[in-house]
Image: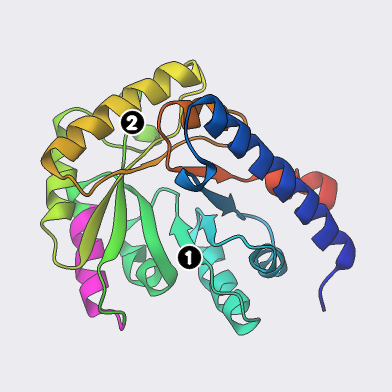
Amino acid sequence: MTDPGRRAQLAAALDEVNGRIGRACAAAGRTADEVTLVAVTKTYPASDVVLLAGLGVTDVGENRDQEAAPKADEARAAGATPRWHFVGQLQRNKARSVVRYAGVVESVDSVRLAEALDRAARDRADPSPLDVLVQVSIDGDTARGGAAGDDLWRVSDTVAGAAGLRLGGVMAVAPMDWEPDRAFELLRGLSERLTGTHPGATTISAGMSGDLEAAVRHGATHVRIGTSLLGMRNLLR
């Protein structure tokens, strides 16, 4: 059974988030259909995914395979089939599990991870390539995830040359001690350099609840929204 109160809550939040995206696009001289909302449902139940899908959300993000895999199965059993984005740091030994449900892996930051995903993707039932974004370390602190310097181009070339993968573009999280505009301007510059070599890699996944406007201003094609859409978990559960 669906919870009418929760559905109404999500519908109101979705309207507000879509309004923010629309206003940000208008201010940037863009149209709202240029930006895809990825609802980050980590820590929230599959029932929320089902409700969001019913409200028109097409893309959902998760950052832990242990949570995402069963959630995807449960949502599918309830009739919800969004495109799942894996957005967290990924261990190579989880590649086979992740490719079973994810349509996009946004957090590829090493050649070895790209190679593991390629092997796993080529063995899955779906014959189409797995979409991959290369995660960029904006400040060069790769311990928090992301590739930097020459590694960024090595990873990109590995993904582009892999039979089981399709290079979609780049993803990044703005460092907490950076102004979002500065971070996303840098990301856009790297994206432009990437598309010079790989013209099809036009995706820029950037921006979350607190900085989506800056991300849209600098060309984000996807924004990953959790708190503004689903609320603070400790207030709801």
Q: Position of residue 164 (x, y in %)?
A: 20, 68
Residue extending furthest toward the right: 5
- Residue at the (84%, 58%) spot, across then down: 8
> Where residue 44 sits: x, y (%)?
68, 58
Bin the neighbour count of mark 2 within 10 Å (Cα to Cα): few under 14, some 14-19, many 20 and up.
many
Label 1 belongs to which residue? 83
Q: Quadrant of the C terminus?
A: bottom right
Vertical relation: 141 (above or below) 62: above
Task: Indicate the position of residue 209 as horizontal and vertical percent values.
Answer: 62, 36
The residues colored magenta run: 113-125
SS at mark 2?
A: loop
Side of 137 where 22 appears, left or right? right
Quadrant in the picture for residue 139: top left
Residue displayed at 72% across by 69% down: 47
Residue count near mark 1 (Cα–Cα under 10 Å), binned few <14, some 14–19, many ≥20: some
2 vs 1, front mark: 1
Q: Residue at x 14, y 67 (%)?
A: 163
- SS of the residue at dot 1? strand
Q: Is residue 131 visible?
A: yes
Q: Which mark identifies residue 155? A: none
In the rendering, at what x and y percent does residue 97 appear? 39, 71
Q: CA distance from mark 2 to mark 1?
A: 25 Å
Disc assigned to residue 137: 2
* Front one among 58 and 100: 58
Residue 152 in sight in this render: no
- On screen, 190 above or below 35? above
Secondary structure, magenta segment, majority class: helix
- What amino acid type is highlighted by mark number 2? Ser
